[in-house]
Amino acid sequence: MFPRLVNFVGALCLALTSQALGQAEKPKPAHDPPGQLFRHAPMPKATRSIVIPLGGIRFAFDTEQLRTHTVWHGELDLYGPQHAHAKRPFIAQPNGKLLWGNPPVIPWRTQPPSAASVPGGNRLTGRFTGTTIEGDRVSLHYELKAGDGERIAMRLTPSLGQRGVRRTLTLGACSQPLWFLANSFAEGESKREVHANGPEGVTIRVINIPMKYTEPIVTEKGAESVYDVREVLTDAEQFWVRVPPREQPVTIDIITRHDGEMEPEPEPSRLAKLGVVGQAEHKPSATPRNPHYQIEHLPLPPELELLITGMDWLEDGRLAVCTWPGEVYLLDGMLSGKGPVTFRRLAKGLNEPMGLLVRDGRLYVSQKQELTEIIFDEQDCRTEFNRLSADWGYSGHYNAFSYGPVLDRDGRFVLANAGHSGRWDMKFMGWGICLGDGGQMEGIASGLREPNGVGVFGPERDIFVTDNQGQWTAACKLNHLRPGEYFGHPSALPEPRERYRGRARFTPPAVWFPYTLARSVSGMAEVTDKRLGPFKGQLLVGDFQNALLVRVFLEKINGNYQGAVFPFLNGFRSGVNRLSYGPDGRLYVGGLQRTWASVAPEPSSLERVIFSGELPFSIRKVEAKRDGFLLTFTEPVKPSAIVPDNFDVSQFRYAYHANYGSPRYSQAGKKDSQTPIVVTGTTLSADRLELRLALAGWKAGHVTQVRCFDVMNESGEPLTHGTFHYTLNEIPGP
């Protein structure tokens, strides 16, 4: 690697450390375990990198510039909460002896290189399409596009040879010659050997061309980004490979030799390999919570730390899960309740996936930097990782998550990107986006902060996202994702930043989650039948920090959603993160805990909620009427309990500001206060299942808190949950 680029790498690593951590002690990184086939790793020079271990060598490929950007002998340092419990802007750094690397330009040309043609002129463009695993061999796939529109398929398979790295390139048919910048070495470095083996007409040419390019350097301190643009001038010995025109695909080998012997990669343990990695006897334990619902703790092999970030079901009854450290598992044997539960590791090395969807036997995973399709052949040990889209900005920030995917009513993939610590120049930060027919992402709505839950609801398959309290986000909330909406968080918008900062109006959520109940909302699931109790058609929403579930009843008023939030169930062993309604009618709950606070005691968990069949005495529905609420109960109410004094009603609202969260404000604007609402009357239906609460003094645009006292069923049993919060965006008309 030429000296200036080496110095730049060192300076950038130092800048990242000092900018991100200040004077704090540098956290100890984690390292890839032996047996890792590849890893999506955001790196300082290429945030969408793929790193492949080759013995003791690490081979890093830039999927945006389609180049081998760094090769080194040593380890890959991994930072970030999921690895080292430390918040860092970039999670991956080379650690070891740098062997060589190439400048940040696409290395393919259609004309002989010269001072006039490098880096512009006849340079090709291209796009990365995916990764294939066959046994222990990893291949990278991409497509080049020439100026005349011709498309050339490429397959790159790196491997380790004697004292060097072999790159096997399979090129599709092409009507014109291609030139490939294989290596660039600076004057004064120890002599390296580069060889190209292939059919007749494949030649290698060594030239010396001054190459000038501009490279942006980005570091981050807190939520602010710091930019530095450097012009880099190289005068390096460049090795160019010429491939002649051909009508059939052609394969060439490029071998770059290094000085010294290469140490072998440590032998991985059996459990590190893909395949069946563990099993646990099906002896789940249950936590008694109430007579109606129990939390059953499912067995996990002791060698697995299953930090679940996505869950969905295959048609054969297996549960597919993805994990925060980047693994995908297939879990078999849970539904039967007999024999062992097996855990087959299907994939490793993904970049902090935060959601998984099964569609037609294929898995779709939302990584930080892309939406990925996973096609697996369990018999042939072959897996394809196809990039469906990477059409959004990605800086490598530890908090730059992409949540989803789900399918909208038109069958399009929908994702939600975090806006928290987003960069103004990054496309679709804080947006709900969908994959259009042309393969490009399209924006739906903006202003999201940390949308850690995406789901579909109702017969019209409306899209909802949960969002978490923070700056410009007064409390956790549930947003109905519709085209053109703005939900309030200043992340990135296609308009001037000054105007954006001063925007005073935003689309209200369908419901606010009061901070006293939920502090870090996560995944959601719709109750689709009566096997989970009397709440069919309602949403269950997880809360990470309090390790619980809440229940949400939604209704439409004038075409807009609003509704009530109830407590539902607590006592989970880890922070509740993902929910999945299983084919057995039970709710499966995936949990994790790492860096962010949770009251739960365990770092990971897989649990399910079992309904006893005994009807709970609860408020099933809350409907807003012109003069108050209509409450519907699950069983008849004792008439003597229905008096106005048994109901305490008040209203509050939140402030929209840059501060973290918001206190409650009364209707008059008094801080830390609520406005009492007068219950003027109660009316019970003849079947005693419906109660009309007449209210005076309530206003739209507020959250209405209702506390019920001494409301009992016929046998004298009180309400399971006697308090709810209704987000009153609109009051219905007559």
Image: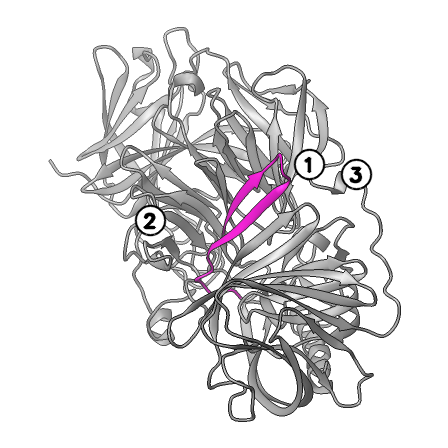
Q: Kindly identify the residue that appears in the image at 71 percent across and 48 percent down.
A: 136
> Which range of residues does the magenta coloring cover?
372-394
Q: Which residue is mark 1?
A: 275
The quarter holding residue 232 reads: bottom right
Task: Tell me which amino acid carries mark 2.
Answer: Leu
C-alpha gap between disc 2 and disc 3 = 45 Å
Q: Along the polypeptide, which appears first: circle 3 or circle 1?
A: 3
Front residue (pair 474, 537): 537
Q: Which residue is mark 3?
A: 270
Using the image, determine if residue 658 lies above or below residue 367.
Answer: below
> Which element type, helix, strand or loop, lies under badge 2?
loop
> Which element type, helix, strand or loop, lies under badge 1?
strand
Front residue (pair 494, 555): 494
Q: Along the polypeptide, which appears first: circle 1 or circle 2?
A: 1
Front residue (pair 534, 267): 267
Contact (Cβ within 8 Å) of mark 1 with mark 2: no
Please rate how many residues cluster around mark 1, counting C-alpha atoms within 10 Å: few if below 14, some from 14 to 19, many from 20.
some
C-alpha gap between disc 3 and disc 1 = 9 Å
Q: Kindly identify the residue that appears in the image at 21 percent across and 39 percent down.
A: 557
Q: Kindly identify the residue that appears in the image at 61 percent across and 35 percent down.
A: 378
Q: Which residue is mark 2?
A: 481
Task: Tell me which amino acid carries mark 3.
Answer: Arg
Please rate how many residues cluster around mark 3, counting C-alpha atoms within 10 Å: few if below 14, some from 14 to 19, many from 20.
few
Q: Is residue 29 visible?
A: yes
Task: Tell me which amino acid carries mark 1.
Answer: Gly
Measuring from the top left, give residue 707's x and y in whole percent: 39, 30
- Is 159 magenta? The answer is no
The quarter holding residue 510 reads: top left
Labels in figure, total = 3
